[in-house]
Amino acid sequence: MNATTTGQKILALYQQSNNYGTLLGMDLELIRAGEVAYHLLITEQLLATPVAAHGGALASLIDGAIGVAGLSMVMNEEKVVSTVELKMNFLAPALKGDRLTAFGKVISKGSRLLFVECDVVNQTGKLVAKGSGTLNAYPAKKIFDDI
């Protein structure tokens, strides 16, 4: 199996095993290596008030976008990533019915550490949140037996 095929398998295994993202209703779009968009509809189940989403839902969206952006940069090296540091700023409320898109982009990649940034916008393009994080890259065999 070549590196690209292995990388695609790692991404598929990640998507199959990401039960939390499925629970929230997050939908992944791979733009290119190091760049992803994660989409999330703010439903009643994600509200903290009668009209606004819980910050944890946005934090999950940011962490997901940052993580998969990083994963897409190292998966062809037969690696996966884990978040070791995460920072977020909530800039505007995400309201019930909003369709959020989190754009994750790798800014810097070393042999083990990646730095990734994320912007979250609503359906009108309004910036709702920003995030950044540091990821640790490690062998995919540590979590996926069939790599």
Image (tube, grey):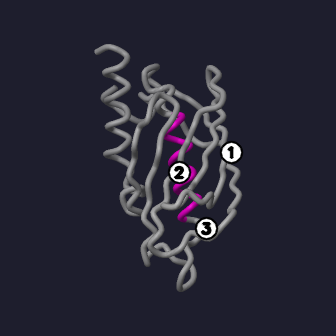
Give the residue number, with chain letter if any, for mark 3.
55
Of the residues under marks 1 and 2, which one precedes in the sequence? 1
Assign a secondary structure to mark 3: helix
Is the Cβ of the residue at disc 1 closer than 8 Å to that at disc 2? no
Residues in magenta, as a range: 57-70
Q: Which mark is residue 102?
A: 2
Rendered view: 139 above or below 91: above
Tell me which amino acid carries mark 3: Gly
Rendered view: 100 above or below 48: above
Q: Residue at x 53, y 64 (%)?
A: 57
Mark 2 closeness class: few <14, some 14–19, many ≥20 residues within 10 Å = many
Tell me which amino acid carries mark 1: Glu
Q: How many marks?
A: 3
Residue at mark 1 to residue at mark 2: CA–CA distance = 18 Å
Residue at mark 1 to residue at mark 3: CA–CA distance = 17 Å
Is the Cβ of the residue at disc 2 closer than 8 Å to that at disc 3? no
Nearest-to-viewer mark from 1 and 3: 3
Q: Position of residue 140 (x, y in %)?
A: 44, 29
Q: Quadrant of the N terminus?
A: top left
Is the Cβ of the residue at disc 1 closer than 8 Å to that at disc 3? no
